[in-house]
Image (tube, grey):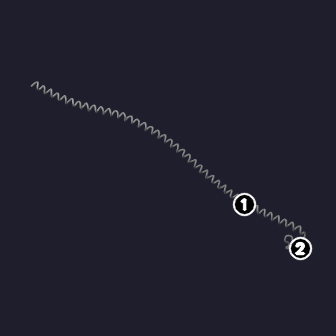
Amino acid sequence: SSCVVLGEDSCGGTPPGGGEEVARLREEVIALKEETQKQAAELERLKAEGGELESAKEEVKRAKEEVAEIEALAMEAEDLREKAQNEAIDMKKEASRLELEIGTMEAERQRMNDELEVAKAALKDTCETMEEHTLLQEEVVSLRQVAAQRSEEIEGLRGQLEG
């Protein structure tokens, strides 16, 4: 009837088959409440785990992004290392080329110094020759003057002899 609440008859009596059925229903209610509490706790645990799973997925996603960034930086660093290595090779080649050029210039400078020494010696010889030539010219002039004087003396003596 509508008066029955948890096995008791609020209308004044106990329903037929009453006490055992009521006890069984109470135990079932208690068991269902416990089961419901367990399910609620399990649901909360699963929700928490779900949240942790989402957090873990986010962490994995961030970690993958960081790995991708690190790999990109590593590739960039490798490119820079290769460029630097190529530049170093180019600089060594340029240094070798310059060393050869310097060697060639040194040889040219030495050749010019040798030519200068030859020219200096030739100039010195020329100067000495010119000095000798000048001295000889002066001597020739002096000897001509002496010869002219003597010629005059001879002419003067001839004039005296004839006279």
- Expressed as whole percent of the image width and height from the top left, the position of residue 36 reads 79, 64
Secondary structure of residue under mark 1: helix
Q: Residue furthest bottom?
A: 11
Q: Residue furthest left?
A: 163
Say which quadrant the N terminus sits in: bottom right
Q: Residue at x 15, y 27 (%)?
A: 153
- Expressed as whole percent of the image width and height from the top left, the position of residue 99 reads 47, 39
Q: Residues within 10 Å of mark 2 (few under 14, many from 20)?
A: few
Q: Residue at x 37, y 34 (%)?
A: 117
Instruction: Please identify the quarter of the rendering in which residue 101 is found.
Output: top left
Vertical placement of 7 versus 99: above or below?
Answer: below
Is 80 in front, or is 128?
A: 128
Q: Residue furthest right?
A: 17
Secondary structure of residue under mark 2: loop
What residue would you read off at disc 2? 13
Question: Is residue 162 toward the left or the right of residue 78 in the image?
Answer: left
Q: Residue at x 87, y 67 (%)?
A: 23
Question: Is residue 147 toward the left or the right of residue 90 in the image?
Answer: left
Instruction: Please identify the quarter of the rendering in which residue 53 is found.
Output: bottom right
Q: In the drawing, what numbered circle is on residue 71? A: none
Q: In the drawing, what numbered circle is on residue 48? A: 1
3D distance between C-alphas at marks 2 and 1: 49 Å
Instruction: Please identify the quarter of the rendering in which residue 116 is found.
Output: top left
Q: Please name the amino acid that badge 1 sits on.
A: Ala
